[in-house]
Amino acid sequence: MVKELLTPKNQEYIERARAVAENVMRPVAAKYDVEQTYPWEVQRAIREAGLSGVWIPEEYGGEGGGVMDLCLVVEQFSRACGGMGVGYAVNALGSFPIILGGTEDQKKRWLPDIASGEKLISFGLSEKDAGSDAGGMTTRAERQGDEYVINGEKKWNTGGAVASLNTIFAVTEPDRGARGISGIVVEKDAPGYRVGKHEDKMGIRCVPVVEIHLDECRVPADNLLGGSEGRGFKHAMMTLDRARPGVAAQAVGLAQGALDLAIEYTGKRKQFGQSISAFQGIQWMLADMGTQIEAARQLVYTAARAADAGAKNISKLSAMCKLMATDVAMKVTTDAVQLFGGYGFVKDYPIEKYMRDAKITQIYEGTNQIQRLVIARSMLREAASSGD
Ligand SMILES: Cc1cc2nc3c(=O)[nH]c(=O)nc-3n(C[C@H](O)[C@H](O)[C@H](O)COP(=O)(O)OP(=O)(O)OC[C@H]3O[C@@H](n4cnc5c(N)ncnc54)[C@H](O)[C@@H]3O)c2cc1C
């Protein structure tokens, strides 16, 4: 990271986030990974540090930091614990549809509590049979008088067990395909709303990922985002364009955290009478890891800045940074385990957790195969429209 390329405000967020990461998250990361319970003490520390609403506009109680500052905070959190990084970032994923598509009244109703950390929010797009093809969802919302009645099931709801609000995507007009999908904010005490199975996960174990059951779930009609039906899928895709750099930042943080540990370990570990970091073979690995991380980081920052600058077609850059950074995280964390030798394979050191935490970044918010589709389609469209 080149600090001089960042604004004083960016640097301030990094410092505040790093203090929470090192003083609060790192000491308890292993404990919550084993217990697979939600770290409320960490959530309190994030609130106390004033970081809960970094990406939320100031007029709704946030810091107005946008995607870039969100990424900087997520990177620092994930450097200490990938699960705590996503436990934080998922609130941006859940609230972007309100920021991007909500009415003024809806923004005023929900965003200040999210910005203060009073309420957590999750994002319910995926279903058992609708993952990469999210538009194939079957959860149905029907308007009945002043209410929507929702029936269906959401799968893989990150943070759903601890969130007070859930942005649920459901079919309101079944014959219109993706144009018949709407976003509806559902409060956890809505009748017919139930948290189901908790997944037993490989990584990011401190954040609950759950099924959500909606059985004749009734919500006020004015919880429909934007006030009119059929805009939900568009808002979900616009949300992913802004949230994918956050996943990429999680990946960069994980990779950097693993490299930090690898540098420390290879400096101390002695074989053949010297530190293993004195061997050129090890140095070349460290050099490649550091180079890949810096390249990924700069692509993440470029995508985040493009989103904040209101650039057009951020889908391509956003998918590119997610694809590259998450592949780098998997490579770097695997190499870091290798550098610990046998000690990397056991839980005496925190390094194996980095590799486990990294894997999900290649899968959620669109797998890396899907990112390649987004990138290629975008490139082909650009070429066709420019006549090249
Ligand atoms: C821990 C975790 C947390 C999650 N959190 C959330 C959340 O908070 N909210 C939410 O809505 N969702 C969430 N998800 C869902 C996640 O986004 C999906 O798992 C992901 O999009 C993939 O969908 P799928 O699992 O159904 O896999 P599938 O879509 O069945 O894909 C299976 C394989 O086929 C490949 N594939 C599919 N289609 C194509 C294609 N056209 N071309 C090439 N390859 C293809 C995929 O890349 C993958 O390798 C989460 C998932 C996990 C595991």
Image (cartoon, helix red, strand yellow):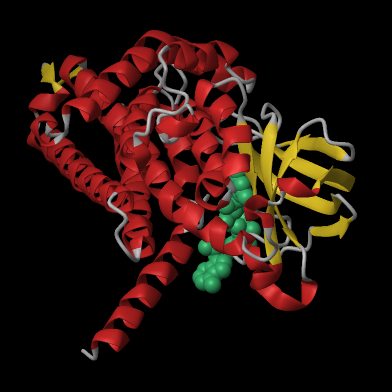
Residue 237 vs residue 302: left or right?
right
**Occupied quadrant, residue 17:** top left
- Which quadrant does the N terminus fall into? top left
At 45% from the left edge and 47% from the top edge, which residue is drawn? Answer: 243
> Which of the pair 159/63 is nearer the observer?
63
Query: Quadrant of the rendered structure where residue 382 is?
Result: bottom left
Q: Kindly tell me whether residue 220 is visible in this rendering.
A: yes
Q: Position of residue 318 (x, y in %)?
A: 36, 56
Q: Position of residue 4 (x, y in %)?
A: 8, 31
Instruction: Report the image quarter containing ligand 1.
Output: bottom right
Q: Quadrant of residue 256?
A: top left
* Residue at 34% from the left image edge and 60% from the top image edge: 314
Against 208, is 381 above or below? Answer: below
Q: Residue at x 56, y 56 (%)?
A: 236
> Percent x, y for residue 119?
62, 25
All told, the count of numbered labels is 0
The spot of residue 102 in percent (x, y) is 58, 48
In-image side of 151 versus 256 (left or right)? right
Q: Is residue 71 above or below residue 241?
A: above
Residue 334 can be seen in this image:
no
Position of 85 relative to 310 (above/below): above
Of all residues shown, which one is farthest toward the bottom? 387
The C terminus - image quarter: bottom left
Q: Residue at x 49, y 34 (%)?
A: 86
